[in-house]
Amino acid sequence: MDLLFLCFLLISLLYSFFCLSKLILQLRGQSCYMLAYECFKPPEDTKLDTDSAARIVLRNKNLGLEEFRFLLKTIVSSGIGESTYCPRNVIEGREECPRLHDAYAEIDEIMFDTLDNLFKRTGFSPSEIDILVVNVSLFSPSPSLTSRIINRYKMREDIKSFNLAGMGCSASVVAIDVVQQLFKTYKNSIGVVVSTEDLGAHWYCGKDKMMMLSNCLFRSGGCSMLFTNKPTLKHRAILKLKNMERTQYGADDEAYNCCMQVEDDQGYSGFRLTKSLVKSAAQALTVNLQVMSPKILPLWELIRFFTASVRNTVKKRELVLFFTSFLVGNGKKKKNTFNVLGGGGLDLKSGIEHFCVHPGGRAVIDGVGKGLKLNEYDLEPARMALHRWGNTSAGGLWYVLGYMEAKKRLKKGDRILMISLGAGFKCNNCVWEVMKDLSDANVWEDCIDSYPPNTLNNPFKEKYSWINDECLSFVKLDFSKMVF
């Protein structure tokens, strides 16, 4: 009887060990590793310096003195420098009548340049790609852009392709989530994500101030990334995805309408950015971090936060909601919780070394920094990416990451919190673990030594402050005939 019991026990232990080993191997196969990324550097003849920007603004016959003054104030305080890039049709003066050819040419240049460099750099062949995801919010032709890439590189017939449109500036993280979800089903796979935006065909030519903002902020750029779940390629990985949280705040009317493609009263289409954008971003980010923070911070920090909050007897109801969201895995909408999650309580730096903030604009960067109690060192990569490249929409995060790498900040074992915000309104965040020390200068190679500059001020105020002269209010000028 004892021998039978021992045999049963041994079989049970062996079966348990087998199940545990199978689970471990399964989880290993579900990992999402980034092997490389390639940011786009536009041609030098599309660079938008002060004088080029002035020519584009002044040839718009719909604008008057009031609009010029508004644009000057906006550009001066935008945080954008003189080395950003603009779509070729806008540089050439065809922004009012863009052709389909212009849109294709703009997107093709970004997609194919970054993909060519990605395949060359990593040594992978396009025929080895199992999953392809492309995100371009404002251009969704037929056949799709994924089909265009497949045709160009003659990829396999069984490739899993997805084309994401209308997802805004946070679409890159959404695309990565699609890849990591597919990795759970398709083992030993390699995936590619292409993130960019079509700006030339959507340049705003009217005079609505809320719609003119997009012309001041958005610039040409994009990025292609290579991912895998193959354990045999782990040694080549630069990053490993540790956590992903997506928040859709579109049920709130103010948040839904704060960033939207519309037509103005004159029939000109463009992107409208309202004053409630920063507020909506803060609310969406707060809800997202309510769910994510307990998963990425050490236990001792959660205990410290809980005991300190109880001792101070402050916001007990918010504490209950916060820890309830942790236990059930579902955040609840709350107001004024930025201080609880940021500097007023939880210390995100106890679990995160680097903050990759979406370079959507100076106001967005300032708001995230204030809410999470980040210092200037933490925000420097986002500010520099905005200054050098502008808001490149979904591709912007990778210019920020590139700055961190070029500055040799990223060391093995470090964790990066990637914060993306976009129309909808969406907040999609993820945490990466650095797999090895990174030091590639990448797209920053020709300018990294000059960053950060002594000042982020651009020359617009110095060159065009005369527009604010009160005397001009009584004089009728034809700005379109001025030469620069």
Image (cartoon, rainbow, N blue to C red):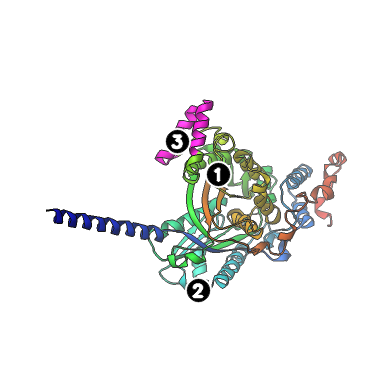
Is residue 120 inside the magenta stretch? no
Residue at image coords 42%, 35%: 324
Q: Earlier in the sequence, mark 1 or mark 2?
A: 2
Is 312 placed left or right of 90 in the picture?
left
Identify the disc placed on residue 323: 3
Residue range in magenta is 302-330
What residue is shown with label 2?
125
Kind of residue at disc 2: Ser
Give the mark count.
3
**Position above or below: 174 against 194:** above
- Crowding around mark 2 (Cα neighbors within 10 Å: few <14, some 14 to 19, many 20+) is few
Q: Earlier in the sequence, mark 2 or mark 3?
A: 2
Q: Main secondary structure of the magenta part?
A: helix
Numbered disc 3: secondary structure = helix
- Crowding around mark 3 (Cα neighbors within 10 Å: few <14, some 14 to 19, many 20+) is some
Q: Position of residue 400 (x, y in %)?
A: 63, 55
Numbered disc 2: secondary structure = loop
Identify the disc placed on residue 350: 1
Residue 349 falls in image quadrant: top right
Which part of the image, by quadrant, shows the C terminus?
bottom right
Kind of residue at disc 3: Phe
Which of label 2 and label 3 is nearer to you?
A: 3
